[in-house]
């Protein structure tokens, strides 16, 4: 019989467990669903035969009894801040404290600390000094090397250094954590073996990798002495991270060396299907939250299904490619349809699938026509500043998924909630259009999969700002908008296109926002989906914001930094 992973001593007793192998600590409420990382990792470890307990949102401000209530794990603590960076979760783009938390029951704030990964890890290392700590999740992943931290306005070392953790797993962690579980099963769970696992980072004062100056990020102290050293290192990191076949990356901290092993190869469909886990999960929040109110993140995601991961869009402000990877991994059609049928049987399901998507809606099964050219390519995007000629952007497999999913009993409607990468749908080549199903896909979405409003993300209208964002021209968006209106008219639809815009992005001035306001008004667009730029760790846009210049060209770049400058730009969305 299926059950939630235990979260309390009472639940351990109910299961008859007198010990646990692994305790996973998270800053989120525990939701046993494939969209929530700690649940996925917990289930993967449990599948390998380990006894896994979840410690969600422990109280870090009292006598720390929460950290002790499940006992001492036999092998390790796994720690994550949750599905979001805790500082993005806590603060607005203007560094104002939020009054809510979508990953907490009742949408209540205050259930996780700032810099949650570091806080949790230090507590655990203090209470259980002999038990290894492995950190992961997006907060750890995007802070794995030295980075600018917007919230403290400081340049920080690797989170592995700050947290005192033993290991860091970056990116989507299923395979490295599965390997760790296998080491435990085979009685080979020792530091030397863990250090050999792909997608792991660790500190060593004895490790002697084959050093290559282009690869090695310079000593942390030198980055503090001169920002130009960080600029050079950022470019080396981004180039290497965009490759399909990566090398070891290191960063010196005095006598200690931070070593990042290359990631696992892009998951095959069979591997990603194996990690879907929907049949093994309760597909619900833990019942302990029933009296505390709804969890908004769950309410938003519970009727949606993830069909692929990764993104080759390369937007400068986005962390997805550095975390999930540039290269797309896709589930098989049969796996997706099994989950659609599983969702349709849920008691809460009313017939509407709110999304069949991923970070970007329309990248399913897309990769290089000849993948040998992808193995060493370090382009940050396969579609900007132009679409790679080697990219297979065939939308027909995605159309088949929509069609098959729509025929599942109990499914009345499927809408696409993920953002559509619209520049991939435009071409003047009729043969290419037909071959890749571009117009066919666009028309199918307009005809069948929009719930009155389609959201896309042009982000800005001014050319030099868009260039800094690594986004297509506004004219490209207008072509898409015109085609959207044509397809609406053809199919007797009266639907709206809702564009996303960003203010305060590096290289954007008040005059640029004034021009955006004019362009929006001229084209009768909506600006309700608008936000201020938040400099999140280790993105290209954040590097520009911190440095004051483009790390690749050395050209000086203006960024709005004061509250008044940022608000002054954002106010143009209200004109």
Image (cartoon, helix red, strand yellow):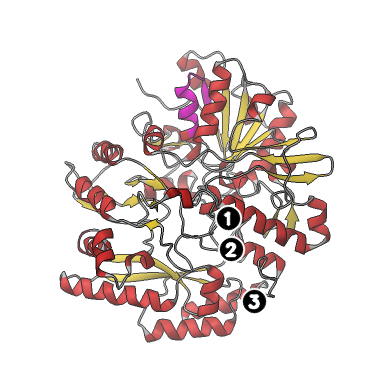
Q: Residues within 10 Å of mark 3 (few under 14, many from 20)?
A: few
State whether residue 8 appears in this view: no
Could you tell me which residue is drawn at 36 percent across and 77 percent down?
A: 478
Is residue 392 visible to the viewer in this orientation of the structure?
yes
- Mark 1 lies on a secondary structure that is helix
Assign a secondary structure to mark 2.
loop
Left or right: where 149 falls relative to 372? right
Q: Magenta includes 376?
A: no
**Mark 1 to mark 2: distance in Å?**
8 Å
Estimate the x, y position of residue 159 in percent, counting from the top left.
69, 45
Crowdedness near tag 2: few (<14), some (14–19) or many (≥20) residues, C-alpha within 10 Å = many
The N terminus sits in image quarter:
top left
The local secondary structure at tag 3 comes to: helix
Pick the front one: 210 or 359? 210
- Please identify the quarter of the rendering in which residue 562 is found: bottom right
Q: Position of residue 217 (x, y in %)?
A: 73, 51
Mark carried by residue 530: none
Picture coordinates of residue 287, whole percent (x, y): 41, 33
- Which residue is the site of mark 2? 534
Residue 88 is tagged as 1
Residue at mark 3: 564
Question: In the figure, is residue 390 to the left or right of 81?
Answer: left
Q: Nearer the viewer, residue 532 or 212?
A: 212
Vertical placement of 462 versus 432: above or below? below
Residue 42 lies in the magenta stretch: yes
Q: Earlier in the sequence, mark 3 or mark 2?
A: 2
Q: Which residue is nearer to you in this view: 60 or 274? A: 274
Structural distance between the alpha carbons of marks 1 and 3: 20 Å
Whether residue 188 is situated above or below residue 497 in the rendered picture: above
Evaluate if marks 1 and 2 touch, with contact meaning CB atoms under 8 Å apart. Answer: yes
Viewer-nearest residue: 428 or 288: 428
Q: Which residues are magenta?
A: 41-53
């Amino acid at each position: 019989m299926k059950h939630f992973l235990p979260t309390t001593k009472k639940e351990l007793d109910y299961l008859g467990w007198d010990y646990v192998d692994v305790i996973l600590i998270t800053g989120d409420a525990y939701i046993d669903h494939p969209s929530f990382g700690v649940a996925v990792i917990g289930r993967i470890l449990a599948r390998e035969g380990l006894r896994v307990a979840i410690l969600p949102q422990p109280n870090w401000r009292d006598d720390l009894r929460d950290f002790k209530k499940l006992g001492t794990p036999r092998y390790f603590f796994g720690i994550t801040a949750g599905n979001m960076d805790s500082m993005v979760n806590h603060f607005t783009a203007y560094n104002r404290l939020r009054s809510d938390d979508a990953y907490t029951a009742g949408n209540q704030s205050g259930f996780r600390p700032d810099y949650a990964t570091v806080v949790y890890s230090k507590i655990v290392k203090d209470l259980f000094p002999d038990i290894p700590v492995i950190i992961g999740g997006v907060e750890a992943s995007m802070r794995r090397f030295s980075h600018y931290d917007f919230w403290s306005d400081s340049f920080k070392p690797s989170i592995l250094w700050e947290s005192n953790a033993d290991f860091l797993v970056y990116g989507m962690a299923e395979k490295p954590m599965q390997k760790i579980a296998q080491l435990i099963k085979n009685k080979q769970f020792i530091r030397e073996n863990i250090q050999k696992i792909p997608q792991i980072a660790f500190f060593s004062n004895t490790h002697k990798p084959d050093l290559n100056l282009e690869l090695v990020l310079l000593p942390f102290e030198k980055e503090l002495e001169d920002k130009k050293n960080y600029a050079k290192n950022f470019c080396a990191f981004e180039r290497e991270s965009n490759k399909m076949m990566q090398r070891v990356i290191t960063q010196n901290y005095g006598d200690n060396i931070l070593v990042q092993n290359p990631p696992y190869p892009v998951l095959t469909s069979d591997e990603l299907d194996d990690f879907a886990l929907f049949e093994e999960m309760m597909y619900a929040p833990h019942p302990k939250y029933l009296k505390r109110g709804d969890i908004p993140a769950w309410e938003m995601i519970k009727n949606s299904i993830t069909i692929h991961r990764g993104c080759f869009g390369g937007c400068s402000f986005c962390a997805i490619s550095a975390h999930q990877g540039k290269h797309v991994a896709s589930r098989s059609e049969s796996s997706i349809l099994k989950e659609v049928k599983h969702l349709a049987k849920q008691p809460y399901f009313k017939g509407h699938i709110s999304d069949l998507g991923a970070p970007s809606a329309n990248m399913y099964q897309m990769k290089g026509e000849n993948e040998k050219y992808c193995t060493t390519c370090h382009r940050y995007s396969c579609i900007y500043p132009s679409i790679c000629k080697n990219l297979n952007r065939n939308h027909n497999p995605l159309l088949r998924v929509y069609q098959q999913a729509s025929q599942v009993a109990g499914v009345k409607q499927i809408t696409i909630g993920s953002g559509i990468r619209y520049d991939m749908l435009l071409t003047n080549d009729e043969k290419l259009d037909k071959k890749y199903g571009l117009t066919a896909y666009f028309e199918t979405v307009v005809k069948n999969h929009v719930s009155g409003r389609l959201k896309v993300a042009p982000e800005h209208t001014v050319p030099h700002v868009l260039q800094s964002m690594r986004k297509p021209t506004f004219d490209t968006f207008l072509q898409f908008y015109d085609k959207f209106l044509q397809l609406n008219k053809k199919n007797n639809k009266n639907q709206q296109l809702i564009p996303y815009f960003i203010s305060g992005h590096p290289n954007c001035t008040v005059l640029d926002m004034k021009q955006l306001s004019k362009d929006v008004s001229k084209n009768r667009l909506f600006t309700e989906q608008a936000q201020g730029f938040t400099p999140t760790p280790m993105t290209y846009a954040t590097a520009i914001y911190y440095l004051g210049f483009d790390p690749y060209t050395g050209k000086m770049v203006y960024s709005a930094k004061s509250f008044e400058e940022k608000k002054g730009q954002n106010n143009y969305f209200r004109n």
